Amino acid sequence: MGLKIWLDDKLVDQADAKVSVFDHGLLYGDGVFEGIRVYGGKIFEHAAHLRRLYDSAKVIRLTVPMDLPAMQAAVEQTAAANQISDGYIRLIITRGVGDLGINPFVCKKASVIIIADAIQLYPEALYEKGLKVVSASTVRNHPMAIPPQVKSLNYLNNILAKIESVDAGAEEAILFNHEGYVAEAAGDNVFIVKNGILYAPPIQAGSLDGVTRRVVIELARREGIEVIEQNLTRFDLYTADEFFMTGTAAEVIGVVQIDGRVIGDGHPGPITRTLRQQFFAYARSR
Ligand code: PXG
């Protein structure tokens, strides 16, 4: 038994899906990745994920060894080979095999890995109850460092924030940028509701351009909810009527407490619930 894994140019058995210890993805976190959902056998927002992948690769001067249509076919083939109807795809491009130095250009060819598996879902009760989060002391990457829009294999900054949330007994950590504005959560984008208006930090505040975020903004506008992308501070989070996060794994999930401040009445709010339902319906209708 085991999964069929796409490795470079073909599907192989899981037992044979191995990478070199000289791969710069391992040695330096040099590479990019995507996490993609499959709903009803269809790759969700496939084009958006691949665009982000190729953009991320371009920024780090990584040549993806397949063109976009070939990558799309490889992802679909991997999902099909593993009979994934509702699941999760992890697409990874590593810099490839090099030597022990950091120069990426000694690596002859980037490696392509595609894993299609079942998704670990949060328990439904967590969506009903809502999450507890904390402000991280770890600052989001400065835009003049590795840009926060690049979904790179180097997640240590987010991992440091995640550790803070675990230490605090919370489910997620909120990262702020070097100017003190809200950027995003360690693995999700953030939204708040105040007086019926939906607010999201702009991408330039230091977040990944989330695929789920884009879909939720579109669905909110369709519902007639005003959406404003503007810088948010800790004050805005603490005094929000509603607070939720979006991401491929979590979809739409309410936040009910941050740094000991209760959001609204302590339960996921009505706009959060509506958007979660709308997202659920949208994802499964496509
Ligand atoms: N910000 C960061 C830093 C992320 O890693 C998001 C926002 C949300 O983006 P999408 O495009 O997914 O709406 C992410 C994505 C996991 C997991 O297992 C995390 C993500 C994706 C898939 C799985 O925690 N994060």
Image (cartoon, grey):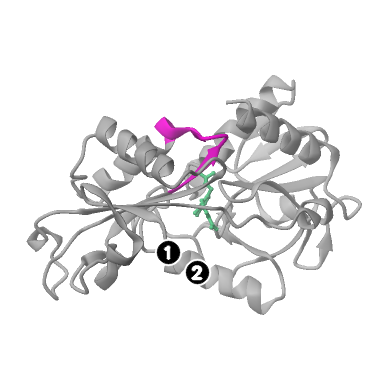
Residue 5 in the image: above or below residue 195: below
CA separation, marks 2 and 1?
6 Å
Which mark, residue 2?
none
Hey, which quadrant is residue 48 in on the image?
Answer: top left
| Labels 2 and 1 touching (C-beta < 8 A) | yes
Residue located 67% across and 30% down the image: 227
Q: Position of residue 99 (x, y in %)?
A: 11, 72
Left or right: 240 in relation to 99: right
Q: Quadrant of the N terminus?
A: bottom left
User: In the rendered image, which residue does mark 2 sit on?
Assistant: 159
Q: Find numbered disc 1 in the image and state the secondary structure of the residue it sits on.
A: loop
Instruction: Give 54 or 238, whichever is nearer the viewer.
Output: 54
Check disc 2 and give the amino acid type: Ile
Q: Is mark 1 within 8 Å of ligand 1?
A: yes
Q: What x and y, as percent, mark residue 113?
A: 31, 54
Within the image, what quadrant is residue 218 found in? top right
Residue 3: percent from left, percent from top = 41, 56
Q: Residues within 10 Å of mark 1 (few under 14, many from 20)?
A: few
| Range shown magenta | 35-48
| Location of mark 1 (residue) | 155
Three-letter residue code for mark 1: Tyr
Q: Find out whether residue 41 is within the magenta segment.
A: yes
**Vertical placement of 284 versus 3: above or below?**
above
